[in-house]
Structures are given as C-alpha cells and as structure tokens.
Image (tube, grey):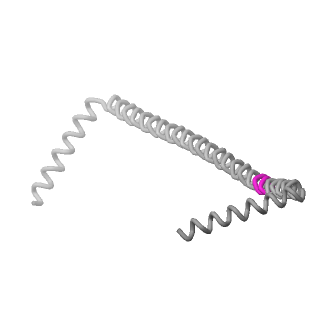
Amino acid sequence: MAKCAQVMNRSVVLTWVMYQSHRAGKIRTNDKLASLKGAIENELWNQERSKAQAVLYEAKRENIQMQLEAVFRERALFAYQQVKNRLEYQAALESIQRRISQKHMVSWVVSHVLKSITPDQDKQSIKKCISDLKALAARA
C-alpha cells in the first residue's frame, strides 16, 4: 500500500511538473532535446551496425574463399586420382604385353628346337640317357 501511495505521489508530482513545464514552454525544448538525443543514439547505433555489417561481409567473403578452396582441393584430388588410375592402367598393360611376348618367345623357341631335333638325334639322346642311368644304378 505504501508503494501504491508512492506511485500516486510520483504521478501527481510528474503531472504537476509537466503542467509547470508546459506553462513555461519547456516542454517544447525538452521534446527537442529528447528528439536530438534520440537522433544521436540512433546515429551511434547505425554506426555500430555499419561496423558489424562490415564484419559480416568479411566473414561472408572468407566463407566463400573457403568454399572455393574446398572445391579446388576436391578437383585437384579427382585429377590426381584419374592420373594415378591411368598410370596404373598403363603399367599393368605394359606388364601384360611383356608377359605375353615373353610367353610367345618361349613357345617359339621350344617349337623350333623340337623341330630341329632329328629322329636320329632323339634315338642317340635316349640311348645316352639309358647308359647314364645304368652307370648311376651300378654306383648305387
């Protein structure tokens, strides 16, 4: 109840002060002062806002740069993988070709050696092998 009385006393006092101020013409100057103070505060707020806006733009620029760098790295990795795959393919291809040519060369040499052996040489070779086996059997 005491607070209610204080509020009422304050409102009565404020009303009386406003009446007296109005009477003296001070309300207009107070309104002008309040308006100018509001304009100053608004301008200060706008200046702070513009500073924050600059920081925001800088953050956006950095974000875009990071995105561009990420795309660049992805593309560089993709190019690296493609080159690596192609080099591995070429190495495997050369290995296969070398193996095939070696196999072909061995079969060609074997076939020509077999063609060059005459039946007489074959009979002599078999006789020599049998005599060598008999000599080994005698030692054992």
Could you say which quadrant of the image residue 110 lies in? top left
> As rendered, which of 96 and 55 lies closer to the eye?
55
Quarter occupied by residue 22: bottom right
In the rendered image, residue 85 lying in the magenta stretch gets the answer no
- Observer-nearest residue: 40 or 12? 12
Q: Identify the residue at horizontal 69%, vertical 52% (top origin).
A: 59
In the picture, measured across the screen, residue 121 lies left or right of residue 9, that is: left
Question: Residue 53 location, x and y as percent?
Answer: 74, 51
Q: Nearer the viewer, residue 123 or 6?
A: 6
* Image height of 85 relative to 39, above or below: above
Question: Quadrant of the image for the C terminus?
Answer: bottom left
In the drawing, does residue 118 fall left or right of residue 136?
A: right
Judged from this view, the residue extending furthest toward the bottom is 2
Query: Which quadrant of the figure has residue 128?
Result: top left
Judging depth in this view, the residue of 80 and 114 nearest the camera is 80
> Is 79 placed above or below 43 here?
above
| Magenta: main secondary structure | helix
Q: Is residue 38 above or below residue 72?
A: below
103 relative position to 6: left or right: left
- The residue positioned 75% from the left and 53% from the top of the image is 49
Q: Residue at x 52, y 37 (%)?
A: 90
Q: Is residue 71 above or below residue 18?
A: above
Residue 12: x and y, percent?
70, 62
User: For the point 32% across and 32% down, which residue is it?
Assistant: 114
On the image, the x and y values in percent for residue 38 come to 80, 55
Q: Which residues are magenta?
A: 45-50
Provide residue 89's location: percent of width, then percent of height. Answer: 49, 37
Q: How many marks?
A: 0
In this rendering, would 48 be left or right of 73? right
